[in-house]
Image (cartoon, helix red, strand yellow):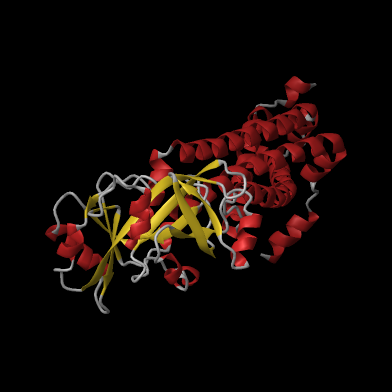
Amino acid sequence: MIGFIQQVQRRTPLGWLQLSKEKGRLLVALSGIAFADVLMFMQLGFQSALYDSNTKLSRTLNADIVLVSPQARNTQNLGTFSRRRLYQAKDIPGVKSAQAFYSNTITWKHPETRKDTSMQVIGFEPEQPALNLPEVNQQLSKIKLPDRVLFDRNSRGSYKDAIAQVEEGKIVSTEIERHTVTITGLFTLGASFGADGILIGSDQTFLHFFPRREAASINLGLVTLQPGYDAKQVATALDSHLPNDVRVLTKQEYIEFEQSYWQKESPIGFIFGLGTAMAFVVGVVIVYQVLSTDVNTHLKEYATFKAMGYRNQYLLAVVFEEAIILAFFGFIPGFILPIGLYNLAAKATALPILMTLSRAILVLILTVIMCGISGAIATRKLQSADPADMF
């Protein structure tokens, strides 16, 4: 090991010397790699925000098992099933409670601008907390009266004045489906790709907003278990006991069901994945152009090395050395710039777009692979270089 380190120390950094000699070309190459990295970071960031924002509500459900319609696709399009299934679920040993949960998107008028905005409204019985959000559960008494709702302060759009008035204890009212609705409290959850924000009301308030909706037609059944029972086993028993018009999922399976929709069925998830792949290809092309130009420029010098007895492995190592140098130095600005862009995008879209260590490592690995592929392609001509043909 010591001998190998000494050999590396004695080795002339030919790759770095060639890159640093043409500073303009080096700067262009690093800019291209940084550009490709920025594109990958942004696509992966938006993809992660898509999954996180649309599963955030699912993660807060106060349930061990979730009953859902077989026609459900995502949180904004759940479908309905009979409330009778909740009473049937209580027949299974281990089931402590089964609660109805209503959810749908609705158009409301912005309290300040009076413009129509798409919101997701959810409803449940205030006496039985349906969400694991202390901020919400402490204010359930505020939504017991009809047409009273809690408003998500992280909703997309400018609600500064309305939020300030609610925090001061003032009455803030607006209109939903020709009904006057009053905001009685605030909570923090966040917008999603499917809706600009969330409103929480009682089950009666929800049904008031949707007069054609029957109380016996619910979107989710939230099942909680008694201590000591395994959710997977009880879910299997429920699945055997209940008719086929309802699907039984553990809470984790329901979260995965929601994320799977955005990953596989939604075109948005595909677009973000395709964008990441295209950014990777752009990076490969840029690095290949730089390395290929460098190889062609120094082809006679490489042929001279061959004539002196240097093997192809040594010459290939020089090109790959250049590729690795470009990968790491290009990654630095490609990592720094997205941090600021994430902040701008988060403020503009109200989506959870943050830099994570796992994403940074992933993009770094992709950058190294990207430059490695480019180096492998660029060395094809180098291997065929014959000193007799050069002179």
Q: Is residue 343 above or below residue 71?
A: below
Q: Is residue 229 above or below residue 321?
A: below
Foreground of the two, 97 or 175: 175
Give the image location of residue 219, x and y in percent: 30, 52
Foreground of the two, 49 or 273: 49
Give the image location of residue 371, x and y in percent: 65, 40
Q: Is residue 243 above or below residue 131?
A: above
Residue 387 in sight: yes
Foreground of the two, 101 or 378: 101
Q: Quadrant of the N terminus?
A: bottom right
Corner quadrant of residue 102: bottom left
The residue drawn where x is 34% and y is 59% is 203
Q: Quadrant of the C terminus?
A: top right
Residue 355 in sight: no
The residue drawn where x is 51% and y is 51% is 197
Q: Tell me: 24 left or right of 221.
A: right
Give the image location of residue 87, x and y in percent: 17, 64
Q: Tell me: 272 left or right of 61.
A: right
Give the image location of residue 346, x and y in percent: 63, 51
The residue drawn where x is 66% and y is 37% is 312
Corner quadrant of residue 23: top right
> How many labels sit on residues?
0
Foreground of the two, 313 or 215: 215
Q: Tell me: 349 left or right of 263.
A: right
Q: Tell me: 246 left or right of 264.
A: left
